[in-house]
């Protein structure tokens, strides 16, 4: 059931990658000044909060209801269907392609040599060229109209994976193991069947580990990841997403932090959990505990507090003086 954790995220998720166009109509401005910081106000605090929620869900996809379940890591539920692409799912699948390439002999044993192979997708394929140097093996992946039904996207472009580490078999039930790599994406294009295009460029590290085959830890960390869609360009920087899931009980706990620049927002904001978001069902439920601080210009901020039954409280301090100016209770799903 590990793939329950990985597959739970794919299920008809409603969030796009960190460049979600959901806030394109925020009215916050269209500046491309990367040094601009958004001033959180009475007019935009809900939109700013939605942008952060969308970004978190683009990586970990909590509350991604609907769709059909497929199998990836044993015990880790991910989701399939018509939903958006999620970075942890994408990373897992890419590493499975590398493992397949290794099984086909794409594992050079002599320094300075390289080996190439082709790995099939549901439609199309991925060319994998592995090379060995003094720092280890690097895998260069080229997507050739690679359609993955579990991710509901067709991929083109290229990326490299380095420092790939695998122990055990996380796709087997109740089996400890580790799966990790450094990713460097070079304008990978993800296209939905209905024509929605996302381009992703940047680097991050991915890690999944379990010491007992029951509790699984996943993380994605990096310094800069740029995504573009019609109507928005988003730069996610100095980011850290980490989630722990129990495959027996479905309980989860996650934290997220980083900086988001968005042309739709007209500038940047920072976000960080003050206490972890926790819940009891990754797919069906939003978190029911946890606090996050979102900060803008002059310490203007929103404090998001997760509540039971899918609700969240937004406490807004528009001038950064420590006094709450506005409090709103909303549904978590309403912020998406």
Image: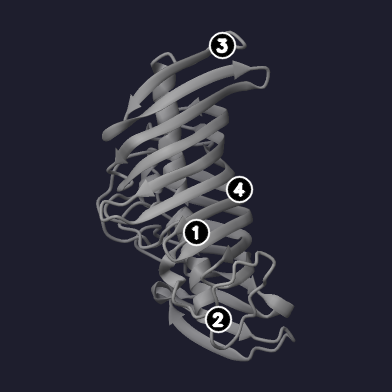
The residue tagged with tag 2: helix, strand or loop? helix
Distance CA(mark 3)–CA(mark 4): 30 Å
Distance CA(mark 2)–CA(mark 1): 18 Å
Instruction: Give the vertical position of 156 relative to 152 (above or below).
Output: above
Identify residue for label 3: 113
Identify residue for label 1: 18
Tell me, for residue 221, which label it has, or none: 4
Residue found 44% across the figure and 82% down from its top: 330
Instruction: Give the vertical position of 121 relative to 56 (above or below).
Output: above
* Residues under numbered marks 3 and 2 in contact, where contact means CB atoms less than 8 Å apart: no
Distance CA(mark 1)–CA(mark 4): 14 Å
Image quarter in which the C terminus is found: bottom left
The residue tagged with tag 3: helix, strand or loop? loop
Circle 3 crowding by C-alpha within 10 Å: few under 14, some 14–19, many from 20: few
Q: Which of 152 and 306 is in front in this view?
A: 152
Mark 4 vs 2, N-terminal side: 2
Distance CA(mark 3)–CA(mark 1): 37 Å
Q: Nearer the viewer, mark 1 or mark 4?
A: 1
Identify residue for label 2: 45
The answer to whether residue 213 is visible is: no
Residue found 51% across the figure and 61% down from its top: 233
Q: Nearer the viewer, residue 78 or 120?
A: 120
Image quarter in which the N terminus is found: top left
Q: How far across and down, in percent of the image, does residue 169 sit?
A: 44, 28
Residue found 49% across the figure and 67% down from its top: 53
């Amino acid at each position: 059931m590990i793939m329950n954790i990985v597959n739970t995220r794919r299920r008809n998720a409603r969030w796009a990658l960190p460049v979600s166009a959901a806030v394109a109509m925020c009215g916050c401005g269209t500046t491309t000044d990367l040094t601009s910081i958004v001033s959180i106000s009475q007019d935009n605090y809900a939109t700013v909060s939605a942008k952060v929620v969308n970004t978190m869900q683009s990586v970990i996809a909590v509350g991604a209801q609907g769709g059909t379940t497929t199998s990836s890591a044993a015990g880790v539920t991910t989701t399939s269907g018509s939903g958006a692409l999620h970075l942890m799912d994408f990373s897992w699948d890419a590493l499975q392609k590398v493992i397949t390439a290794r099984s086909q002999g794409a594992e050079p044993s002599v320094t300075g040599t390289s080996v190439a192979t082709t790995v099939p997708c549901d439609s199309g394929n991925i060319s994998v060229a592995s090379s060995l140097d003094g720092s280890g093996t690097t895998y260069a992946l080229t997507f050739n109209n690679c359609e993955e039904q579990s991710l509901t996207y067709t991929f083109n472009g290229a990326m490299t994976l380095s420092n790939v580490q695998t122990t055990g078999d996380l796709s087997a039930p109740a089996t400890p193991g580790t799966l990790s790599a450094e990713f460097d994406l070079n304008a990978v294009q993800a296209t939905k069947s209905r024509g929605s295009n996302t381009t992703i460029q940047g680097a991050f590290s991915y890690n999944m580990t379990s010491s007992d085959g029951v509790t699984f830890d996943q993380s994605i960390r990096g310094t800069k990841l740029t995504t573009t869609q019609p109507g928005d360009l988003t730069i996610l920087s100095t980011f850290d997403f980490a989630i722990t899931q129990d495959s027996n009980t479905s309980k989860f706990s996650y934290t997220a932090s980083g900086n988001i620049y968005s042309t739709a927002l007209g500038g940047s904001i920072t976000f960080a959990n003050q206490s972890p978001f926790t819940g009891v069902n990754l797919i069906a439920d939003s978190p029911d505990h946890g606090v996050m601080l979102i900060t803008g210009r002059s310490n203007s901020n929103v404090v998001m507090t997760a509540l039971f039954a899918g609700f969240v409280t937004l406490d807004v301090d528009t001038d950064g003086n420590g006094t709450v100016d506005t409090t709103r209770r909303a549904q978590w799903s309403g912020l998406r």
